[in-house]
Amino acid sequence: MLTATACASDDEGETTSGGVPLVAKGTLTTCTHLPYPPFQFERDGKVVGFDVALIDRVAKELGVKQKIVDTPFENFKTGAFLNSGECDLAAAGMTITDERKKNVDFSVPYFDATQALLATAKSKVTSLAGVKTGKRTLGAQSGTTGESHAKEQGFDPVAFESSDAVLNGLRTGQVDAVVIDYPVVQSWLKDPANAQAFRLGEHIQTGEQYGISVKKGNDKLRAAIDKVIKESRADGGYNRIYEQWIGPLPQDQG
Ligand code: GLN
């Protein structure tokens, strides 16, 4: 039987009553890479979004508060910040891939994503094929699945460090089109200035699924995250945060 009190395992960290190790006492520390709307971005000085809301539920389950740390995207592949004890988990609209699984453990999938092509209106490009035939410049976010997809299709996309930089590359005309996760494009296009300047092109069905990553072997935390994902899908909590941050629920979703 679990006891109600948490016990400190060392000076800084703690193990919750459920046996989940935490790198900082009273805190579930999340590493992310800002901004990645609608999953995590700053609004009125606060980091908010779909992933933030989901991990808040995990923190609640553990009886602690979530703290968010902004880290370079490269960390998500190597798991360095998890191994060094900087963060308990990473939540970054991050796709579960076999390559990443070599370095980190993933929760059950919590989001189905696709890639999208977004182009400047004046380029008139609507597809990757069109980028090629029109000899247009393509951009992507460094280290992401969008970048890998473009490379697999024979492109050598201009690499940007963050989603912000990707958007800026389009705005300044450094690139004519970009490949990036569709939900991010959707969120950009809510801004009338973006909707006017850019056009949504093809949807690329990559079959991607997002997962929350933890340090390899941190099964206790992974199990707690899985439990929250499954429970929130069952109790309607998932749908509520989906509608709040993403939009109307897809037809095929319960
Ligand atoms: N889903 C993409 C990936 O995992 C992009 C994630 C991100 O840029 N935060 O590579």
Image: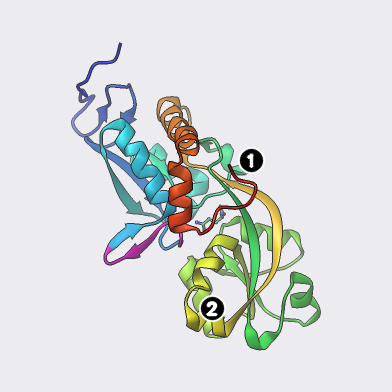
Residue 23 inside the magenta-drawn segment: no
Task: Give the secondary structure at mark 2.
Answer: helix
Q: Which residues are magenta?
A: 37-45
- Split into 4 quadrants, where in the image is the C terminus? top right
Residue 128 spot, x, y in % from top left:
74, 70
The residue beneath circle 2 is 169
The residue beneath circle 1 is 98
Q: Nearer the viewer, residue 236 or 144?
A: 236
Would you say 11 lies left or right of 248 here?
Answer: left
Residue 235 spot, x, y in % from top left:
45, 36
Residue 142 picture quarter: bottom right
Task: Give the secondary structure at mark 1.
Answer: helix
- Split into 4 quadrants, where in the image is the N terminus? top left
Check disc 2 and give the amino acid type.
Gly
Q: CA distance from mark 1 to mark 2?
A: 30 Å
Residue 180 picture quarter: bottom right
